Amino acid sequence: MKKRNIKKKSPQNNFAKLSVFQNQKYKFKKKCPLSGKGAPVVDYKNVKLLKRYISENGKILPSRITSVSQKKQRELSLSIKRARNLALI
């Protein structure tokens, strides 16, 4: 019988092994930039704000990229579609 070389896991430098595919333990969620105190109001007339949440191709960016809450994402997409319809964007 052959003996196998088994490597033991060392608990040293767990943070050095962090990557894109991390455990839920180390992830954190950014706060929604459109909710909270002093946040801008989502409105179809506020073109400057709406352009920040549209890609170069004119597509609406998803909330996982922009870190906008679900409620505000729905308002945002509705106001972007209204602005498109009125040719503001």
Image (spheres, rainbow, N blue to C red):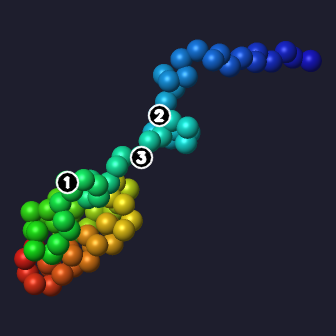
Q: Residue at x 80, y 18 (%)?
A: 4
Mark 2 vs mark 3, CA separation in Å: 16 Å
Residue wearing tag 2:
19
Q: Residue furthest right?
A: 1
Classify mark 1: residues with Cα within 10 Å, few (<14), some (14-19) or many (20+).
few
Say if 14 sits above or below 26 in the image: above
Quadrant in the picture for the N terminus = top right
Q: Quadrant of residue 64?
A: bottom left
Q: 32 or 56, which lies in front? A: 32
Q: In the rendering, at what x and y percent does residue 82 appear?
A: 18, 81
Residue at (76, 18) in percent of width and height = 6
- Residue 29's mark? 3
Question: Which residue is depicted at the point 32% across and 54% down?
Answer: 32
Q: Secondary structure at mark 1?
A: loop
User: Separation of disc 1 and disc 3 at Cα?
Assistant: 20 Å
Horizontal and vertical percent position of residue 71: 36, 68
**Under tag 3, what secondary structure?**
loop
Question: Image check: 72 left or right of 56?
Answer: right
Of tags 2 and 3, the one toward the viewer is: 3
